[in-house]
Image (cartoon, grey):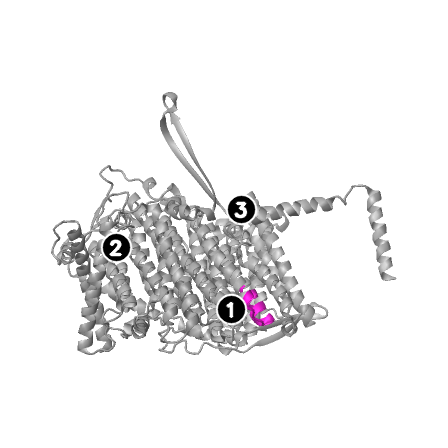
Amino acid sequence: MSLFLANLSLLLALFSALVAPIAGCAGGIWSRLGRTPVLLGRLGPGSAGPGEERRSPRISRLARIAPFILLALSGGFGALAGIIALRGGATSTATVALGLPWLSWHERLDSLSGFFFCVIGLPLIAVSLFGPGYVREFEHGRHPLWVLSFFTGFFVAGMELVLLADDAFLFMIAWELMSVGSYFLVAFQHEHSANRRAAFLYLLMAEIGAIAVILAFGVLAGFGGGLTFAALRGAALSPLWASIAFVLALTGFGMKAGLVPLHAWLPEAHPVAPSHISALMSGVMLKIAVYGFIRFTFDLLHQFHWQWGVLVLVIGSASAVLGILYALQQQDLKRLLAYSSVENVGIVFVALGLSLIFLSNGKTHLGTLGLVAALLHSLNHALFKSLLFLGAGSILYRAHEQSLEHMGGLIHRMPKTAAFFLLGTLSIAGLPPLNGFVSEWLVFQTALQAGTLDSGVLRSLIPTASAVLALTAALAATCFVKVYGVAFLGLPRSHHIAHAREVPHRGMLAGPALLAACCVLLGVLPTPLIDLLGRVTQPLTGFVLPDISALGWLWLTPVAPEVASYAPALVLFGILAVGWLSYYLLYRRTGLEPRRAEPWDCGFGGLTARMQYTSGAFSMPIRRIFEPVFGMHESIEVTTDGPAATRVRALRYHFQVLDRAWPILYEPAGHTVTRLARWVGRLQTGNIRTYLGYSFFTLVVLLWMIS
Amino acid sequence: MVWALAILQTLLFIAAAPLLASWLKRIKCRLQNRRAPSLFQPYRDLRKLYRKRPIVPYPASWIFRAAPYIVFASTVLAAAIVPLAAVDLPTARIADVIVLVGFFALGRTFQVLAGMDIGTAFGGMGSSREMTVSSLAEPAMLMAVFTLAMSAHTTNLSQAMNYVHDTGLVLRPSFVFALGGLLLVAIAETGRIPVDNPATHLELTMIHEAMILEYSGRWLALIEWASQIKLMLYGVLIANIFFPWGIAQDFSWPALICGVAAIALKLALLAVVLGLSEALFAKMRIFRVQEYLGFAYLLGVLGLLSHIILEAARVHH
C-alpha cells in the first residue's frame, strides 16, 4: 500500500514534468490552427487575433497550473506513503522490470525512506501552492515556462526515486536525475553570466560528489557481490575498507549536503534558481543527501567507529559555525538563506557524529537519541527554510529586490507574508516554543551525556563541539533578527520596496501558511513525531527511545524525566497567558490609547530611511570580532572638492566578504587541474603521424594482452 | 497545592525584583557618597509609568506594541522555572536550563526587533550591539551551565540544585570556573557596568537603553520590570546553583520561610558584590566586550574540561 502510494507520487511527479510541454505543444498547434484561416477556410483573418487571445491564456494558464497540481498531489501521496510506512513500520519491496538486463530495479520503502518522504512531501505541497502565482513572473519572460516545470518534475521525481532505490544502480540513476534536473533549474535564467557560472560549478561539484558515491558503493559491491542493497548489507568489510567506503560516502553525500569545505557551490547555486526551486533545493534536496549518508552509514555499512564519529562531528561543527558566520555577512537575502543551510546541515551532522560516537561506544540509547535529533532537525530545517525561501520569493515577486540593503518596512506593505516570515525567523533562530528549538535542544541533550563515555579524549571533544554549537545557535539568532529587522521593519530603503504590495495570489500565502503552521505544531507538540521516529531508529540502531514521554504526552523527556524535561505546549500556554494577562491588566483596565508621534530625532528633525542601520552595519561588530575567519575587502572612497581638495563631499564605504574556502581549496585545486590538463595535453601534438603511432601501439599492446 | 505554591513563588519573584534593583542602587549610592532614594522608588516609577499615555512612533508596526508583552511574558516564564525558595516545584519541570537560555533569547529577540521597528539610528545601533553582546554571552552562559549539568547529570535546575545541596561543600575547580563565567555573563546580559550602563543616556555608549529609547508609558514599565526580573533571575541562578544552602527541600512552612529568608540574604550579599564591582570598574568600549565575553566563554570551557578531566574520571574509577 505505502509503496504503491510512493510509486504513484513518483509517477505524478514525472507526469508533472511532461504536462506542460504537452500543453505547450498543444497550445502551439491550437493557436497555429486558429491563425491559418486559409487552410481551415472558416475564420476570416480578422477573427484569428481574438480567437488566439481567447484560447491561449487558458492553455497557458493550464500549462502553468497543471504541473503544480500534479506536484501537490505527488507531495500529498508521498507524505501519505511516508506516514503509512512510518506508522506501520513495515517494509515493502518491489522489483520493477526496468534497468539493466541482469539487474532490474529494486524498490523498497521502509520507515527511514518513509520519514524522508514526509520531509519531501510537506514542503512540496507548500511549494506547489506557492508556485502557480510565483511563476507568472516568468510567463512573459525570456524563457519558456515549460522548461521550468519540465525540469522541476524530473528533479522531484529524482529525489523520490532516491528514497525508493534499493540497489546502487537505481540509486545512482535517481541521484543523477536529481542533480541534472536541478542543474537546469539553476541555469534557468542563463542570460546572466553569474548564473551560468553558478550552474556549471554546481554541476561540476555534483558530479565529483556522485563519483565519490559511486566509488563508495563500489567498495561495498566489491565485497558484497552484488549491487542490491541487500547484497551490500551483507558485505563483510575489514575496518580499513569500511573506513575507505565511509570517507568516500561522507565526501559524496557531504558535497551534496553542502558541508564545509565542500559547500562552495551551495551559496552560488541556490540563490540564482527561481525562489520556489531554491526552497526545494535548500529545504529538501540537502536532506536527500542526509538520507543518503544515513542509509549508507547506519544501514548499509552498519559498523560504527568512533573515529568516524569524530570526523563527522568536527566537519559538522565547522560547517555550522562557518555557515552562520558567512550567512551573517551576506546582504543578498537568498544567498544568506543558502549559507544558513550550510549551518543547519552542519547541525544535522553534529547530531549524526554524536550518534556515531555513542553507538561505537555501545551507548545505543544515546546514539539513538543523536539520530533522532538529526532526523528531527532535518525535517524542521526543511520546513522553515522552505518557508523563508518562499517569503524571499514573495518579496522578489512584488519588489524585484533580493538585497537586504534596499529593503525595509515590508511589514506594513506585506503584513501576511511578514507574519509567516516572522514565524520562520523565530523557528530558524532556535527560539522556544517553535520547532527549531526542539531539535537543537535534543542535540544539546545528547552532547551533555558525553560524561558517560570512557575515553577522556571523546569526553573533552564533545563538550568543545557543543561549545561551538552554542555559539552557532546564538549567531543564528543574531543573523535572523538582522534579516527580519532590516527587511521587514523600519523604513523602506528603496523606491520599489516602498511601493510593494501584498502578494496577489491566495496560493502564495497558503504555501507559507502551511509551513508556518507545521513549524508551530512540531514546536509545540513534538512528542508524537519523536515517538514515531522510534520506528526509524529501530532497524538502524536496534533501539527505540524508551521513555520519551515519561511524564505524559505534553512532556518531552529524551533521556530520563529527572535528567531533562521540556513541555513546549505549557511554555506556549504560559507565554500567551502571561502576555494576555499583562495586556488585560495594563491596557483594558486603564484604557489609555497610545498616541502617535514622530520618533526621537535628537531635535535636528528630518529622520530619513538612510539614517537607519543597514544590514552591513548591523553585522559590523560580528565582522570585526571574527575578522580572521573572513576574506574581507574594504575600501573607503573619498570625494573632495574646494581649494586643494580639503573639503570632503562624499564618503563611500565598500566592503566585500569573500569565502575563504576559495583561495584555500578551490583555486589551488583549479590550478592543479589546469596544470595537469596542460601536461596531458602534450600528448596532443596535432600531428597525424603521432596519432597513428598511438593507435598502432595501443593495438599492439591489446593484442599482446589477449594472446 | 504544589502548583499553587509554584505560582506563589513566581509571583513573589516578580514582586521582589524591583526591590533587588533598588537595593543595588542603594549600595551604589552609598559607595559613591550619594543619598539613595527610598527602597520602594522602583515601584513608584512603575506605577507612574503605568498611568502615562504611551506614545507610538509613526513607523512602528504591531511588533513594537507586542514586544513589551512578549518580553515580559518570557521573563516571567523564566522566573517560573527557576527555583527561588523551594526546589521540586512542578514548574521547574516545564523547562530546563537550556530552555531558560531560550526564554532569554526569545525576549531579547523581540526587544531587538522592536528597536529596529522604529527605523531610527538609535534603535538599530542598540539592536546590533545587543545582539553582538548576547551572541557572545549566550554560548558562555551555556558553557557554564553545561559544566553544572554534566556534574549533576541533569539540566533540570531543581535537580541540579538538589545535587549540589546534597553533595555538600566540595571545592570543585569546575564550579569555580563556571561561577566566574556565569558572573561575567550575568553582568553582560543584565546590561551592567562594565559592558553597558543602565543609568546612561549618552548616545554613543548605550546598548539596552538605545533599543528601548522610543518606549514610554506602560510598555516602558513592562520592559523595565522585565529587566529587573532578569537581573534577579541571574542573581537567583548564581546564588541557588552554587550556594543552594537554605533552600526548602520540602513544602513545610518553616522550610519555606527559611528558604525565602535564605534567598533574600544571598541576593542582598550578591548585590553588594555587584555594586562594589560597578563602583570599581569603568565602562569599557564596545570592541573590548568580545575580549571580556571571550574570557567568560573560556572560563566556561575550562570548567567543562576540568570537570571532565579531573572530576569525572574520579567518579568513574
Q: Which mark is residue A49?
A: 3
Percent of width and height locating residue A62 = 52, 57
Left or right of A403, for residue A3: right
Which residue lies at the image location 31% right of the left edge and 60% below the top edge? B104
Q: Chain of mark 3?
A: A
Residue A506 appears anywhere in the view = no
Magenta residues, start to end: A290-307
Residue type at mark 3: give it.
Answer: Gly
Tag in front: 1 or 2 = 1
- Left/right placement of residue A335 relative to residue A564 reads right
Query: For residue A300: magenta?
Result: yes
User: Quarter of the image containing the C terminus of chain A?
Assistant: bottom right
Label 2 lies in what chain?
A: B
Residue A402 inside the magenta-drawn segment:
no
For label 3, count other residues whose C-alpha is less than 10 Å away and answer few (under 14), some (14-19) or many (20+): few
Which residue is the site of mark 1? A357
Give residue A518's mark.
none
Q: Which residue is mark 2?
A: B65
Nearer-the-camera pick, B259 or A427: B259
Badge 1: chain ID = A
Badge 1 density bin: few <14, some 14–19, many ≥20, Cα 10 Å: many
* Residue toward you, A680 or A32: A680
Number of marks in the rendered image: 3
Residue B163: percent from left, percent from top: 32, 73
Q: Crowding near pointer 2: few (<14 within 10 Å), some, many (20+)?
A: some
Magenta span dominant secondary structure: helix
Is residue B244 placed above or below A410 in the rendered structure? below
Please tell me whether mark 2 sits on a helix, a strand or a loop.
helix
The span from disc 3 to disc 1 (Cα, nearest Å) is 70 Å
Tag nearer the camera, 3 or 1: 1
Q: Is residue B168 above or below residue A174?
A: below
| Residue projecting furthest to the top | A643
